[in-house]
Amino acid sequence: MDLSCDCCHILGVALGALLLFVLLGIAHRLGVIYQLFHKVETNSSRHGGELVANLLRAHGVRYVFTLVGGHISPILVACEKLGIRVVDTRQEATAVFAADAVARLSGTVGVAAVTAGPGLTNTVTAIKNAQMAESPLLLIGGSAATLLQGRGALQDIDQMSLFKPICKFCASVRTVRQIVPVLRKAMALAQSGTPGPVFVEFPIDILYPYHVVHKELSPKGVPKGIVGKVINWYLQNHLKNLFAGAWEPCDVSPLQVSIPLATADQVQRCIELVSRAKKPVFLLGSQVTLPPIPVEKLRKSLESLGIPCFLGGMARGMMGKDSPLHIRQNRRDALKEADLVILAGTVCDFRLSYGRVLNRRSKIIAVNRDRSQLLKNSDMFWKPTVAIQGDAGSFIVNLSEGLKGYTCPSDWTEQLKSGDVTKEKTNKQKAEEKTERHLNPLKVLHLVDEEMADDSIIVADGGDFVGSAAYILRPRGPLRWLDPGAFGTLGVGGGFALGAKLCRPDSEVWIVFGDGSLGYSIVEFDTYTRHKTPVIALIGNDACWSQISREQVPMLGSNVACSLAYNDYHTVAEGFGGKGFLVTRQDDDRIVDIIKEGQKACKNGKAVLINVLIGKTNFREGSISV
């Protein structure tokens, strides 16, 4: 009898403890316990957008690109009040591309803010491009209120599922007090390791003031019955939990960024390989331009080593306009002959024929922050002698410091440079050939290269015409070339140029468009006019998607879907407040004069579009994304 009572007593205590534990868990989940220790300031007019703006300013953010929407208005208004420039575009993808350009040129995180639903879905291609280009970028997205998600609210979709596969970090902020810690983490992760985009979702009730949200959540009449009173309590508790502790002081300073570096032993092994090499060559990719190494310091290290360099992606221009170390032509032949190849941020994907262009007898040093990119296709076509998961720029500086007094064999550099001279002489001869119709695009590009200012930034957006431009136009220095990168996205030009002009307002910014790619961006001439960001757009107008047509017609016998028209794009630009020029065959002797007129108009504050009608040539050098 006593044993039975004891068991019942123990069981009763256990059930009571379990019930208490469950109740405490529910109370914690509902924020009831947190509210006991943290104040809800019901009379405050502050809002979550202010916390977002404060954090962005503390992280050195100067620009927020957007297409306005009610879900995110508090963020935009707060940013404006704190002196962060809010730049609104005509399409959400353009806002992300502009933020991408700022990230690449400034070494900070680029920021774009867009509204919920279709506002966010319109950014997917641009975010994927940023991921593949390894650009640190913060995408801020609005969303339906916390209690209305999944209940059919306006523009309510599962946004997190869209961005988790293409972002390094995704989070949905659930209370106002979470805004700062979530954003601090996101900003640090965007820059750590292999940089990339991050996404933070802000439900609308997280961003607006207490009294606005209270009005939306309060019942219209007095709740009746037990069920009504329970629902009302739940709504009021949810409201209090949203704002509990919202305005308590918090640290908004940047968290430490983690960057992988080569070890001393790895650098020493590479020093030995370089010192023994007779025909070494660098292949520099976009990663070499990433912080922490300033590009000018990296350039000096490369000049100290004296090793010939092939430049791709954001590394174009690294050695300046006319460096004897920069080899622009005959890369495939050089790689066959080289006895040491240093892949510094360069990936063995389609741009290097998946590694097949590398000589199997060559020693290969590969350096990349991302392990999957570091070893891509090494199981099939190539094998690294040394593979280093680390920052390529830091590695080159350390290599240079360890090779003081080293001199690369001059006959090797001279051999490669002489091949450059021969190839470029041939290209110039092709530029003088008459096309069957309109102007020779190679001639136009050579003339633009000669007239382009020394501080110019070149934005590449297109296929056939831009592919030719990549071999003719010479970036004037480091961080003066922007192209989409490995994803090969059309439509980057409008946003890239906008971001570039804001970062370098005194520089001449040129966008090289094909007439096909221009269609994505021409509306942004309105943005350039409104925001006083004059750029120069050079259009190679051949009324065709020529990069596709070149292969489709001979292979499949049809030009279907490849034909465009010789449209008056210059007139469209003028309709948006810009200055337009039409250049035809009759202007063959006036091309330089028209270029200079365009430059003058740009200096006077006009966005310029030079619409050049071009003919077909046999010049074909391949993709710009190398």
Image (spheres, grey):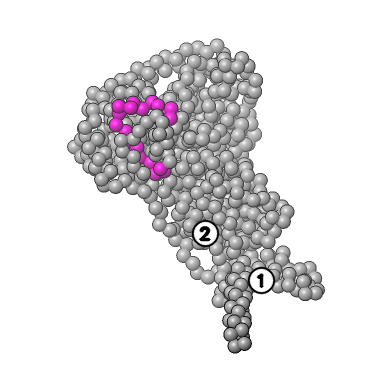
Label placed on residue 182: 2
Rendering coords of residue 154 (x, y %)? 71, 52
Image quarter in which the C terminus is found: top left
Secondary element under disc 2, as helix, strand or loop, is helix
| Residue displayed at 55% across by 69% down | 247
Residue type at mark 1?
A: Asn
Splitting the image into 4 quarters, where does residue 559 fall?
top right
Left or right: residue 413 compared with residue 132: left
| Residue displayed at 68% across by 65% down | 212
Label placed on residue 237: 1
Image quarter in which the N terminus is found: bottom right
Q: Residues within 10 Å of mark 2 (few under 14, many from 20)?
A: some
Verify whether residue 356 appears in magenta.
yes
Rendering coords of residue 494 (x, y %)? 55, 37
| Residue displayed at 47% across by 12% down | 433
Q: Nearer the viewer, residue 267 or 155?
A: 267
| Residue displayed at 55% across by 63% down | 178
- The answer to whether residue 157 of the structure is visible from this angle is yes
Splitting the image into 4 quarters, where does residue 422 fall?
top left
Q: Earlier in the sequence, mark 2 or mark 1?
A: 2
Residue type at mark 2?
A: Val
Q: Nearer the viewer, residue 49 or 551?
A: 551
Contact (Cβ within 8 Å) of mark 2 with mark 1: no
Boundaries of the magenta span: 352-371
Left or right: residue 367 compared with residue 6: left
Left or right: residue 550 compared with residue 312: right
Rendering coords of residue 183 (x, y %)? 51, 57
